[in-house]
Amino acid sequence: MAVGSVQVYYGEGRGKSPAALGRAIRAASEGKTVFIIQFLKGKADDEMHFLRRLEPEIKFFRFEKSEEYYNELTAEEQHEEGKNIKNGINFARKVLATGECDMLILDEVLGIVDHGLIALEELIGLIRARLDDMDLILTGWVLPDKLRSHIDEIYHLMPES
């Protein structure tokens, strides 16, 4: 039986999402099913139009309704998007528990912890809910120390100088 892993791409540098996407493309080329749930990025991203062309091999999900990035929203809009983000987390929980895919990427999930939209303990619970043969990839800017013991592979991307 294959053994999956938990990987994190984090840091202030660029390239976290593309690195995770590279892993997704590799997995899909091996006949594996891949789900990507993106957080905090808004819906106006032109990148999303391109990524949709990778379906059905790689399935993309965004639960947020706003066109703008989360950081660009008013406090009231952020509150509303917080509800949508929680729907995305609930979907991730279901996918992890049922094993609907071979690889799940939670893009910018560390950011929703930073923003206080979910507690770190809830993210740890998601990691623990993962089936043993599933790969789970997390991305974001900050990797909390308390999370490190739950991760198999950590990649720290640094900003260009």
Image (spheres, rainbow, N blue to C red):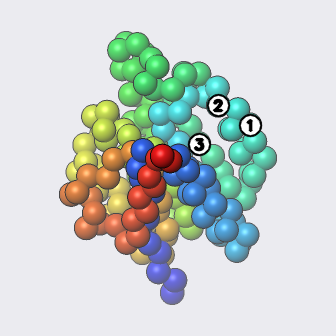
Q: Give the camera-side residue of 13 and 54.
A: 13
Mark 3, secondary structure of its residue: strand
Q: Quadrant of residue 61?
A: top right
In the rendered image, residue 6, in percent from the top left (x then y), is placed at: 41, 67
Question: Mark 3: which amino acid?
Answer: Phe
In the rendered image, residue 49, in percent from the top left (x then y), is placed at: 74, 37
Which residue is found at the position 25% from the left and 67% from the top?
A: 149
Question: Mark 2: which amino acid?
Answer: Asp
Q: Give the camera-side residue of 44 and 129.
A: 44
Which residue is found at the position 45% from the left and 26% from the top?
A: 70
Earlier sequence position, callout 3 versus callout 1: 1
In the depicted structure, whether residue 160 falls above or below residue 3 = above
Report crowding for label 1: few under 14, some 14 to 19, many 20 or more residues within 10 A (C-alpha).
few
In the rendered image, residue 75, in percent from the top left (x then y), is placed at: 35, 14
Task: Name the residue furthest front.
Answer: 161
Which residue is found at the position 46% from the left and 19% from the top?
A: 72
Q: Is residue 13 left or right of residue 31?
A: left
Q: Give the camera-side residue of 27 and 144.
A: 144
Q: Dot 3 corresponds to which residue? A: 61
